[in-house]
Amino acid sequence: MLDMSFQGKEFPGYNFEVDRSKIKELCLAIGDDNPLFFDKEFAIKEGYKDTPASLTFPTVLNFWGYPEIWKRMTEMGINIKRLLHAKEDYEYFAPIYPGDIITGTVAVESMRDSAAMEMVTFKSVYKRGDETVLIAKMTIVVPGGN
């Protein structure tokens, strides 16, 4: 059963230094062989200042940068052994590059608890200095029953 008092709660922020190897690792893991993410010279020719992070990189920011998310979910009453990933939404405002120090904050945007399922959406805001570079939303579902 979800602890609904977490609705709207923001967790302590964290910093993550974007590492070129993490960009490459994610792309290799998902089978994305676009040279934009592997070859700095190619990326510069394409108009970037370096190899940008791929569009699904917020997953790395969330789980490598804020591994406490699992503890927070458990505190909220989420059975992390049964959760399903429902969806991700990303709103980019600027590219993210190797060497960037990204500050992330995670908040519980919405919660729903019923006999059929529990559903929680987390909203993460990522900044480089004072500039918001990305807003990401992750929705998870825990089916009802045992």
Image (cartoon, grey):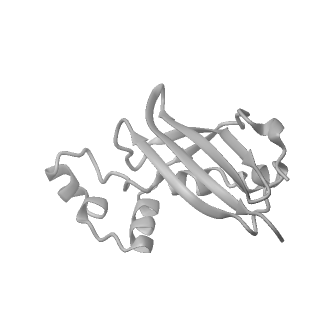
Task: Name the residue at 60% across, 52% down.
Answer: 139
In the rendered image, residue 100, in percent from the top left (x then y), is placed at 44, 42
Count of all numbered marks drawn on residues in the image: 0
Task: Name the residue at 64% across, 65% down.
Answer: 84
Depth check, front residue: 32 or 145: 145
In the rendered image, residue 16, in percent from the top left (x then y), is placed at 56, 46
Left or right of residue 120: residue 57 = left
Depth check, front residue: 100 or 135: 135
Q: Is residue 126 above or below residue 57?
A: above
Residue 11 location, quadrant: top right
Q: Is residue 10 above or below residue 71?
A: above
In the rendered image, residue 17, in percent from the top left (x then y), is placed at 51, 47
In the rendered image, residue 143, in percent from the top left (x then y), is placed at 72, 64
Q: Residue furthest front?
A: 115
Task: Name the residue at 71% across, 43% down.
Answer: 111
Q: Quadrant of the C terminus?
A: bottom right
Left or right of residue 2: residue 67 = left
Residue 25 location, quadrant: bottom left
Depth check, front residue: 106 or 51: 106
Left or right of residue 13: residue 134 = left
